[in-house]
Image: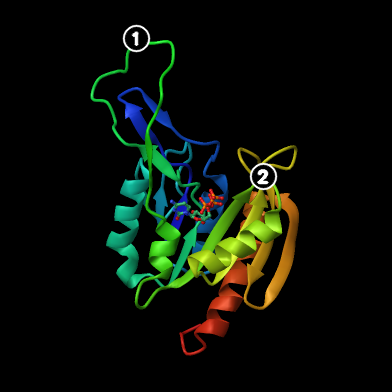
Amino acid sequence: IVTAGPTWEALDPVRGLTNHSSGRMGYALASALQDAGAAITLISGPAALHPPYGVNCIRITSAEEMAESVMANIATCDIFVGVAAVADYRPVVSAEQKIKKNSETLTLALVRNPDILAMVAALDNAPFTVGFAAETENVTSNAEKKLTAKGIDMIAANPVSGDNSAFNSDSNELTLIDKNGISHLSRCSKPLLAQKLTKEIARRYYETYPAKDS
Ligand code: CTP
């Protein structure tokens, strides 16, 4: 399973909270993993992309829908890669009708969304679980904290601010962290980076589960 793209947390029928994720990294990774022989379910938030040919693509809108879809498909999953930029919070209430501008200020009350990656990693029989970390500062140390806090096998950290932002860009670079240490995949196109990351995931997966069929 690969999750990709942003999520959209509706405020009312015409507005919502979202982010700059284009889905390109997740779609490229789904394609590269498929080329390496995996049967892929791509669970995607709103993205203006065609899924790679042959990939089972499930389109969802909100983080809660993404969590539901992941959990409905996780039983047969060997490797889970959370590339999606999941919204951490959603409005407490999504208004049924368009919110009118009746006052000078408007305060939004938000509630935490489920952490899909942490939920997957905490399952009995959890798949090999890979996270992404979108960071605007202290990329490596923040990603190391996420690796531990979420109890995942590996994390790929990317910068999401400034000239080198991964968001809405054709290229990206990744810092890979697992229990054995840190390595770096230097900046290149997202499809090429996805191929390199696929090799890194596959190597670690077969190190973790040597009995699995390669
Ligand atoms: N993630 C998730 N569910 C969430 C939030 C994040 O599954 N509700 C996953 C993302 O798909 C990614 C990883 O967690 O693989 C890290 O996402 P990121 O946005 O970098 O970090 P957060 O956990 O949201 O922490 P923070 O926003 O505080 O940096």
Mark 2 → mark 1, Cα distance in angstroms: 35 Å
Residue at point 46%, 85% (across, down): 212
Residue type indicated by callout 1: Asn
Q: Which residue is mark 1?
A: 102
Crowd band around label 2 with a 10 angstrom C-alpha radius: few (<14), some (14–19), many (20+)? few
Q: Which residue is mark 2?
A: 136
Residue at point 36%, 78% (across, down): 125
Q: How many marks?
A: 2
- Where 210 sits versus 188, above or below? below
* Residue 39 visible to an observer of this rendering: no
Q: Looking at the image, which is closer to me, 154 or 194?
A: 154
Q: Residue furthest left?
A: 96
Q: Looking at the image, which is closer to me, 186 or 161?
A: 161
Percent of width and height locating residue 202: 57, 74
Q: Looking at the image, which is closer to me, 173 or 19?
A: 19
Sequence-wise first label, 2 or 1:
1
Residue type indicated by callout 2: Thr
Q: Residue furthest bottom?
A: 211
- Where 38 sits versus 212, above or below? above
Residue at point 71%, 53% (across, down): 138
Give the secondary structure at mark 2.
Answer: loop
Percent of width and height locating residue 177: 65, 68
Say which quarter of the image contains residue 203.
bottom right
Percent of width and height locating residue 27: 51, 50
Q: Is residue 165 left or right of residue 130?
A: right
Asked if the residue under mark 1 is in contact with the one under mark 2, i.e. CB atoms within 8 Å, the reply is no
